[in-house]
Image (cartoon, grey):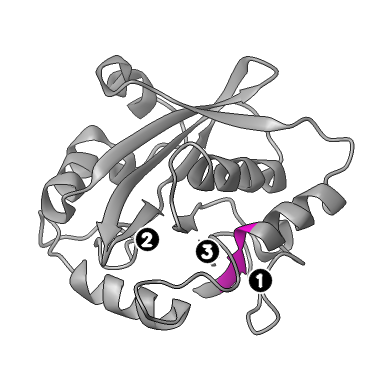
Amino acid sequence: MVRTSSSADRLRAWRNTSAKGSTKLVLERLDPAEVEWSQLDSLSDRNVFQTREWVEFVEATQAAEPVVARVLDGGRTVAFFTGLLARRFGVRILGSPFQGWATGYLGFNRLEAISNRDAVAALVDFAFGPLGCLHLEFRDRPLAGSDVDGCSDPETSAAGSVGEVRLEVFASDDKDFGGSSRAEFVSRASRSSSCTPPSTRRPSGSA
């Protein structure tokens, strides 16, 4: 697993320079009461960690808030996103998933082919805009290092094949995370989030 770290500002600048001329994707959060879980679970790229039962397990063990959003391209739904909001040491986090949740891939379910670069950039705008987060962690099975090449901070690497990249994004380069450095915050938050999955048989791909 390759972890690549970035700031939201760096990722937005990367998007603006690397995706000129592409269609801008937008995430729109769904009302929890309106989420059609059976429809989502019927999608061909759906996995066990994205099901209602698993999301509710994480919600209960992490005091987290489920987030399901549709991805719009010009008003047309082209994908769905699954994640959860949590607060650690006063910091609002969007995890899809977050470390310690005994959860594998979340991320997107695609209805049609979309640009991974555009999807990641739209997720960043969503997390640090409407959701008001300071930290985002994201692991999506189709994501490859080449999809985020050039967006990471100088000390990290985005190299990695498909399914091997965990993207961590912070609100800014100099944001104070509860008096800790970014690395210290993530380490403390992941330790405080550790939980046991509901089955002794962990599905493949869990983190």
* Three-letter residue code for mark 3: Phe
Give the x, y percent position of residue 135.
Answer: 45, 60
- Which residue shows up at 71% across the image and 40% down it? 115
Toward the viewer: 206 or 98? Answer: 98
Give the x, y percent position of residue 101.
Answer: 25, 61
Residue 6 sits inside the magenta stretch: yes
- Which residue shows up at 67% across the image and 73% down it? 159
Give the x, y percent position of residue 136.
Answer: 46, 57
- How dense is the environment of label 3, judged by Cα within 10 Å: few (below 14), some, or many (20 and up)? many
- How dense is the environment of label 2, judged by Cα within 10 Å: few (below 14), some, or many (20 and up)? few
Residues tagged 3 and 2 counted as in contact (Cβ below 8 A): no
Q: Earlier in the sequence, mark 3 or mark 2?
A: 3
Q: Earlier in the sequence, mark 3 or mark 1?
A: 1
Q: Which residues are magenta?
A: 4-8
Dot 2 falls on a residue whose secondary structure is: loop
Looking at the image, residue 75 sits to the left or right of residue 104; the answer is right
Q: Which residue is mark 1?
A: 158
Q: Nearer the viewer, mark 3 or mark 1?
A: 3
Give the x, y percent position of residue 155.
Answer: 65, 85
- Which residue shows up at 23% across the image and 76% down it? 191
Residues tagged 3 and 1 counted as in contact (Cβ below 8 A): no
Residue 129 vertical placement versus 34 (above, below):
below
* Three-letter residue code for mark 2: Gly
* Three-letter residue code for mark 1: Ala
Label number found at residue 170: 3
Q: Earlier in the sequence, mark 1 or mark 2?
A: 1
Q: State whether the magenta stretch is mostly helix, strand or loop.
A: strand
Q: Which residue is mark 2?
A: 205
Toward the viewer: 131 or 98? Answer: 131
Residue 1 sits inside the magenta stretch: no
Residue 96 visible in image: no
